[in-house]
Image (tube, helix red, strand yellow):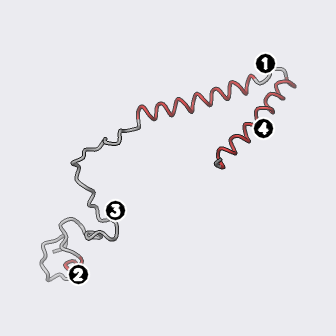
Amino acid sequence: MSDNRRLALITTAVAVPLGIGLDLVIGYSPFPGYGVVIGLLGCMAIIIGSKWVGKLLLDRPQDYYADDAAPDVQPDVLPPEHPDAGRMPGDAGPAARLDPTAGSGGVYG
């Protein structure tokens, strides 16, 4: 069980009896635990509703993007072992950038 789930269960196990006990002592609500039940049902409605809205409006199918889309060639996102890593599109390479007489026709040439 994850730490978050364990913490949620412990918090609920402490809050529910405490809320019912306060209702018994104060006697304000229609039945003992009324506020606890309303709060729990309200939180569940918010969580389930937000998950439903997220699925409906935000999720996209696995094949949402076209299969013929060009691959990402940005040099900052290419893995280091890729042959074009660190090069800009239209660039002749690192040697041409350093040698101004190379006339490579690249970004700086």
Label 1, residues with CA under 10 Å away: few <14, some 14-19, many ≥20: few
Q: Which residue is mark 1?
A: 31
Residue that extends furthest to the top in the rendered view of this protein: 30
The residue tagged 4 is 14
Tag of residue 98:
2
Task: From the image, tell me which residue sits under label 3.
Answer: 77
- Sequence order check, earlier mark of 1 and 4: 4
Residue occupying image coordinates x 17% and y 67%: 90
Pick whichever of labels 4 and 2 is earlier in the sequence.
4
Regarding mark 2 in the picture, which secondary structure is present there?
helix
Q: Secondary structure at mark 4?
A: helix
Please state the horizontal and vertical placement of residue 81, each as a whole percent of the image: 32, 71
In x, y percent, where is residue 91? Answer: 19, 70
Picture quadrant of residue 37: top right
Indicate the amino acid at tag 3.
Val
Say which residue appears at 57% left-offset and 30% top-offset: 46
Mark 1 or mark 3: which comes first in sequence? Answer: 1
Amino acid type at image mark 2? Leu
Whether tag 1 and tag 4 are in contact, CB under 8 A, the answer is: no
Q: Is residue 24 left or right of residue 40?
A: right
**Residue closest to the eye, 10 or 77:** 10
Which is more N-terminal, label 1 or label 2?
Answer: 1
- In the rendered image, which quarter contains the C terminus? bottom left
Q: Amino acid at mark 4?
A: Val
